[in-house]
Image (cartoon, grey):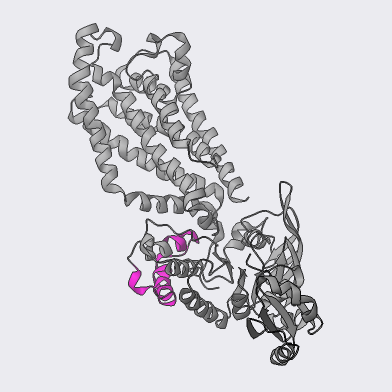
Amino acid sequence: MSNPLISVRGLTKVFGDFTAVNGIDFDVAKGESFGLLGPNGAGKSTTMRILAATSTRTSGSVEILEKDPELFGPLVRAHLGVVPQQDNLDNELTVSENLYIYGRYFGLSKKFIKGKIEELLEFAQLEEKRDVKVEALSGGMKRRLTIARGLVSEPDILLLDEPTTGLDPQARHILWDRLFRLKEQGVTLVLTTHFMDEAEQLCDRLVVMDKGSIMAEGSPSGLIKQYSTKEVLEVRFGSDRNKEVATQLEQMCDRMETLPDRLLMYTDDGEKLLEEIAAAKLHPTTSLVRRSSLEDVFLRLTGRTLIE
Amino acid sequence: MNTGINVPQIQRFGALYIASARLKSISKWRTIIAAVDIGNPLFYLIAVGIGIGVLVEQGSGTSETSGIKYIAFIAPALLANTAIMGIMDETVFPTIEGFKWRKLFFAQNSTPISGRQIALGVYLAALCRGIFSVSIYYTLLLAFNVVDFGVSILLVPVAILGGAAFGAIILFAAAKIEKDDQFFNILSRLVIMPMFLFSGTFFPLTSMPIYLQPIGWVSPLWHATELGREVAFDYGISNVMFLTHIIVLVSLVVVGIRLSMSQFEKRLAK
């Protein structure tokens, strides 16, 4: 990668006797949409706070726009837009006041911010809410405002920590659409998520993290190709019978995962496998053929599901 | 990048950006603040000036109060206490809110602004609130003829110095505590209340038993009150004590704000 915007080598962060991030390496190129995928507690947010030039690291090296964020915090932060996991808007101020105040923290001129506010309100679909106090907004609106706020300084890199956690499906889709637009405009996005569909939709490339380490790296489709089969057959025989039939079924597919409520059978042709199961006179109570997802990659890599 | 972000300029003026944002938030409460800042002095001036004051003056004359009216005797303390309460409101609440409830400080720290500038900005805005509250109180003292306009105007900066000293320390304390559940109870019942009663507010500190006097010595309120009485009414304290009061208050400001700034920086970088 020539001149990456972000370059991380051997990054480690220790809190007391707990290692939150354990020697990770990755690069992010200009214009790329890069994701950190992993369950809660994987070290994603800690990594993000270090990338945001607000938290210190225990060891390793980090360069953002060719500068060490620990030595040049304000200089690095001048080029970043940060969307934290928990909205930290000023509830007492209105939507447009929040944008204005935040722009002033970057020392931007009043004239510039005023113009920018119009653009951002449109982007966040909050034009009608401009003079409404933030505490009256819905969760999805607050999220969009937080993202708009992160864009007020026209950052080179936008860091998003769990951008859609806690939102209902409709609000998530609106947000994905907005983020996709930013991606099209060439904004470099770095985001963390524990939603595999989010990672598949938004990330050009991602790392799978677990317990502070990177388990795998690649594009969503590349990871699926590498660590899973084309299709997955999910079958349920009822919680007691699942175990009984497991040994027999295991012979019939490339790989199998036994979850508490269902069996996941990995194969390139799900329908054909289902016919074979029927021919063997094993009749599952329910069955579903689907394509492999990043969830399957994670299960393969860690033996655990993403959302526990 | 065509936004023209000037980082050296932010490093110079960042605290002022924070202070102006804080003042914007504070101004949303202007009606309540004005009601409290006018109501509180009125209650005291009526209750103490007309009620208790008459009783005190009938009982002992004005021998214990350097020959001035009782309400005038306690006026410097009331002013300093007003500065303390106002500045405390605007340091404790925003600090706990900033670190914990709303995490606003983390948003501010995501910009080129540093933790040290956030601490200073919060403090400066709180001082503005102190100046506002004390000015109203002083105006009412004039209106009620408690003090004559003139040298007594020095009571205003003295009171603010007292509030600033307390505020700098309390800013550090608020930034330091992680569990806030009992903080307000402890602060108001075990710090503010005894400080208000035992800082030579209503009677000279020396009229208390010696073992209670140390409360006054460590209290910014006592130092500001003694200083105020001296500048406004020639209370008759020695030059050494006069200087001591100033040195104690200024030291509290300097030490408190330095501790606060590094604590903000440390806590935000966790």
Report x, y in % for residue A211: 72, 60
Identity of the residue drawn at 44% across and 27% down: B191
Identity of the residue drawn at 75% across and 77% down: A245
Identity of the residue drawn at 40% across and 42% down: B90
Q: Is residue A210 left or right of residue A163?
A: right
Task: Decide whether residue A193 is among the magenta residues.
Answer: no
Task: Decide whether residue A125 is among the magenta residues.
Answer: yes
Residue A206, image quadrant = bottom right
Q: Nearer the viewer, residue A209 or A10?
A: A209
Report x, y in % for residue B10: 52, 56
Q: Quadrant of the N terminus of chain B?
A: bottom right
Q: Nearer the viewer, residue B156 or B102?
A: B102
Q: Nearer the viewer, residue A205 or A230?
A: A230
Main SS, magenta residues: helix
Q: What span is colored magenta in the figure?
A: A101-130
The answer to whether residue A4 shows anywhere in this view is: no
Q: How many marks?
A: 0
Above or below residue B58? Residue A243 is below
Residue A216, image quadrant = bottom right
Above or below residue A281? Residue A173 is above
Report x, y in % for residue A65: 66, 68
Residue at the outermost front position: A281
Q: Is residue B144 left or right of residue A250?
A: left
Above or below residue A17? Residue A230 is below
The answer to whether residue B123 shows anywhere in this view is: yes
Report x, y in % for residue B200: 37, 17
